[in-house]
Image (spheres, grey):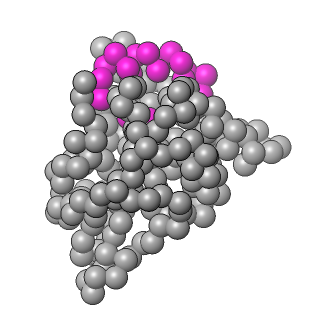
Amino acid sequence: MYNIIEQLSDDSFLYLQPWFYNNQLALRCELGIDEDKYMENAFSRAIQIASILFENRKIDAAFFNQYFDADGSVYVEGDFELNIDKKIDLNRNLLLASDDIDDDISAVKRCIAYDVDFTTLESILKNQIECQINPLVSFVSLDNQCIFSVYDDRGCDVVFFAKEKYKEFYVKLEQYFLDYDREKMRETFDSI
């Protein structure tokens, strides 16, 4: 089985935003729909998608990047309930292609938490949808070989590390697809 955790710990692993456009095996789903109860719908759909990806409610890991300015202070501070098990120094030069990095950033650490419970995932997703936390937290399923990340109330990306899993979850998540990117996802599905 492909080891996503090992990959996350590699300082050369580029997991750049927007994740859908920077990873070949990725799906993009729409969250916020309908003007009535838009935010409620966004949260509900995020939980539905997470429940499909983490069917056994087991989240193997969660991660986010922490940025530091020139004097070593945290540039963007996350305010969420994760017990960090590991911090990896990332090669800042590899991240320059990302829109997230600006000139004030001098160092980046990837923070990883293992065995995250589903209630914590729900709490973090709610705050991400309401744009109350930054940086973005992503969630890992080793069984499904994927990374799930909500970028805001509009949508989420799912990156897969196995073609078989992409095909399996393409079918399971198709009803949630963002129409704008539907054709690109279909082309990937047809090509594998």
Point out the residue furthest to the bottom here.
71
Answer with the quarter of the image where residue 135 lies: bottom left
* Side of 190 where 47 appears, left or right: right
Q: Is residue 142 above or below residue 87?
A: above
Pick the front one: 25 or 184? 25
Question: Residue 173: percent from the left, percent from the top?
Answer: 54, 23
Task: Identify which residue is drawn at 47% across, 67% down.
Answer: 78
Answer yes or no: is residue 129 visible: no
* Side of 191 where 18 appears, left or right: right
Task: Identify which residue is drawn at 38% across, 20% down.
Answer: 165
* Side of 18 where 173 appears, left or right: right
* Side of 80 where 14 appears, left or right: left
How many callouts does the rendering have?
0
Q: Is residue 49 above or below residue 14?
A: above
Question: Residue 163: percent from the left, percent from the top?
Answer: 31, 19
Task: Identify which residue is drawn at 39% across, 59% down.
Answer: 84
Question: Residue 145: percent from the left, percent from the top?
Answer: 35, 29
Residue 120 included in the magenta stretch of the image:
no
In the image, the segment drawn in magenta is 158-179
